[in-house]
Image (tube, helix red, strand yellow):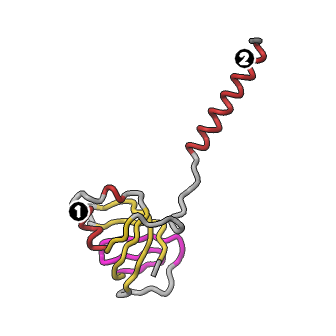
């Protein structure tokens, strides 16, 4: 094998490794709005799962939560005082006391405030 051929083989190998490494590291962002929920759950039961250390399997999963709105801010809704839902856009047409169904990504549980956090939320109903 000539030196030129070895050089071309080395360059093409490095290019392939670089391409696959780049596509592995920089995957497309998830679109939670179009994903199918892995579980449908009511807000109090969702909190209980995390309190009993049974909620870790829900982390980074798309879930649908049903409950009553207890607090509304510009881009945030709190359901049943224990599920914090963040939205990308301003909220309109929702108020305290409404029963709501929300789909979002479960990002964790704050054991200090005893609240489950969802982001990339969308209102289903």
Q: Residue at left 59%, top 38%?
A: 21
Observer-side mark, 2 or 1, equals 2
The residue stretch that appears in magenta: 70-90
Asked which quadrant contains residue 10, the reply is top right
Marking on residue 106: none
Q: Are marks 2 and 1 in contact (CB under 8 Å)?
A: no
Q: Residue at left 34%, top 82%?
A: 68
**Pointer 1: residues within 10 angstroms few (<14), some, or many (20+)?**
some
Question: Which quarter of the rendering shows the N terminus?
Answer: top right
Asked which quadrant contains residue 110, the reply is bottom left
* Residue identifier under label 2: 6
User: Is residue 83 in the magenta section?
Assistant: yes
From the viewer's side, name the closer residue of 92 and 3. 3
Marking on residue 51: 1
Q: Is 124 positioned to the left or the right of 51 in the image?
A: right
On the image, the x and y values in percent for residue 42 come to 31, 74
Asked which quadrant contains residue 14, the reply is top right
On the image, the x and y values in percent for residue 12 come to 71, 28
- Mark 2 to mark 1 CA distance (whole Å): 60 Å
**Pointer 2: residues within 10 angstroms few (<14), some, or many (20+)?**
few
């Amino acid at each position: 094998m000539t030196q030129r051929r070895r050089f071309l083989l080395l360059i093409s190998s490095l290019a392939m490794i670089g391409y696959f490494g780049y596509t592995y590291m920089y995957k497309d962002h998830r679109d939670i709005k179009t994903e199918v929920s892995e579980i449908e759950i009511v807000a109090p039961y969702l909190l209980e799962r995390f309190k009993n250390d049974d909620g870790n399997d829900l982390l980074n999963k798309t879930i649908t939560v049903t409950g009553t709105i207890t607090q509304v801010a510009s881009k945030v809704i709190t359901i049943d005082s224990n599920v914090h839902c963040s939205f990308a856009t301003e909220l309109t047409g929702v108020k305290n006391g409404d029963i709501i169904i929300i789909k979002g990504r479960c990002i964790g549980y704050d054991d200090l405030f005893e609240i489950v956090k969802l982001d990339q939320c969308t209102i289903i109903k």
